[in-house]
Amino acid sequence: MLNAMRKLFEEARSQGFEELNGETLFKDEVKNFDGTVSKDEVLYTLLNSEQFSLTRTEVASITTLMMDINRNDLGRFDVDELHFSYRSYIKYYEIVEQRILDLLDKFKITIEKKFNYDVDSLYKLTSEL
């Protein structure tokens, strides 16, 4: 189930989506006043969207995760909660990405010290070959 949610978020991130509750996915006429969308509308929107390659099973898993079992949600899906989860995923991705870049910079500095050679110059030299 969580893999389907991660796939949705990763596809949205790679497509450059800023928000998952906006006009790009859900038109205002399908949203209720409280920001919810019917479960069927979510299914059809994600399955019929050209931007996503989600299967029916994956979309069903996402809707199952997002439905509130503690209250009677009347078959409505809170797209604002989906958007909040997406923003959290993006923040997490940026933090991990920055840590990896920092780690690679530390490796670069270590290599430069070890060989007394500028790694960027070495990269240019090897890329020309």
Image (spheres, helix red, strand yellow):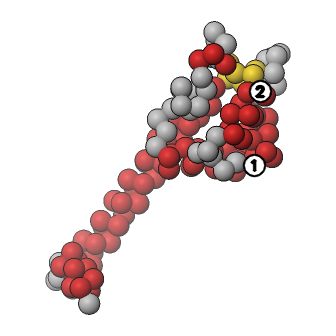
The three-letter code of the residue at mark 1 reads: Thr
- Left or right side of 26 for 43: right
Q: Residues within 10 Å of mark 1 (few under 14, many from 20)?
A: few
- Left or right side of 75 for 31: left
Q: Residue at x 61, y 45 (%)?
A: 50
- The residue tagged 1 is 55
Q: Is residue 42 above or below residue 107?
A: above
Q: Residue at x 75, y 49 (%)?
A: 55
Q: Residue at x 61, y 26 (%)?
A: 26
- The residue tagged 2 is 39
Q: Say which quarter of the image contains residue 68.
A: top right
Q: Residues within 10 Å of mark 2 (few under 14, many from 20)?
A: some
Q: Say which quarter of the image contains residue 64.
A: top right
Residue 80 position in % (x across, y down)? 60, 24
Does residue 84 show up? no
- Closest to the observer: 110 or 45? 45
Does residue 3 show up? yes
The three-letter code of the residue at mark 2 reads: Lys
Q: Earlier in the sequence, mark 2 or mark 1?
A: 2
Residue 12 position in % (x across, y down)? 55, 43
Mark-to-mark CA distance, 2 and 1: 16 Å
Residue 22 position in % (x across, y down)? 53, 26
Residue 23 position in % (x across, y down)? 54, 26
- Closest to the observer: 27 or 22? 27
- Left or right side of 125 for 87: right
Circle 2: element type: helix
